[in-house]
Amino acid sequence: MAKILVVDDAAFMRMMLRTMLTEAGHEIIGEAANGLEAVNAYLTTKPDLVTMDITMPELDGVGAVKEIRGHDPAARIIMCSAMGQKAMVVDAISAGAKDFVVKPFQKDRVVESVNKVLGL
């Protein structure tokens, strides 16, 4: 299936996404704990898709989306947000994110979003 980069400042959230996505047949090729790490990991791993948290230290998810899309306009990024971050989600979609999922994660919704963005 797809090679995915998981980005979230909370190790627990990265682990949850890793489990959900590997169970769905995808390969996790990297993880990052902030936006700067995400940009560097994207450039070195060239994933098929990125799951990106919005609120992170160093560089937030919206900034990371802009940076990644600056390097690769075709980048496929799904934003992960907590409830109540609607304005930030709108900013992320405007910056080029393809979809968003809301925390706490529901496996069916995460897999559905990944498959939709990948065109599966």
Image: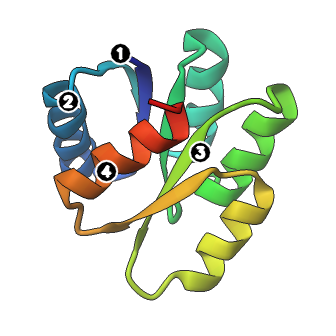
Q: Earlier in the sequence, mark 1 or mark 2?
A: 1
* Mark toward the start of the polypeptide (3 vs 2): 2
Residue 20: image x %, image y %? 18, 39
Counting from the top left corner in percent of width and height, residue 104 is at 23, 68
Residue in the foreground of this view, choosing between 65 and 99: 99
| Residue 12 falls left or right of residue 32 | left
| Residue at 67% across, 17% down | 43
Helix, strand or loop status at disc 2: loop
Crowding near pointer 4: few (<14 within 10 Å), some, many (20+)?
many
User: Looking at the image, do the residues carrying marks 3 and 4 touch, with CB atoms under 8 Å apart?
Assistant: no
Residue bearing the label numbered 3: 35
Depth check, mark 3 against mark 2: the one in front is 2
Q: Would you name the residue on which mark 4 appears?
A: 110
Mark-to-mark CA distance, 3 and 2: 25 Å
Q: Are marks 1 and 4 in contact (CB under 8 Å)?
A: no
- Is the N terminus in the top left, top right, bottom left or bottom right quadrant? top left
Instruction: Name the mark nearer the viewer: 3 or 4.
Output: 4
Q: Amino acid at mark 1?
A: Met
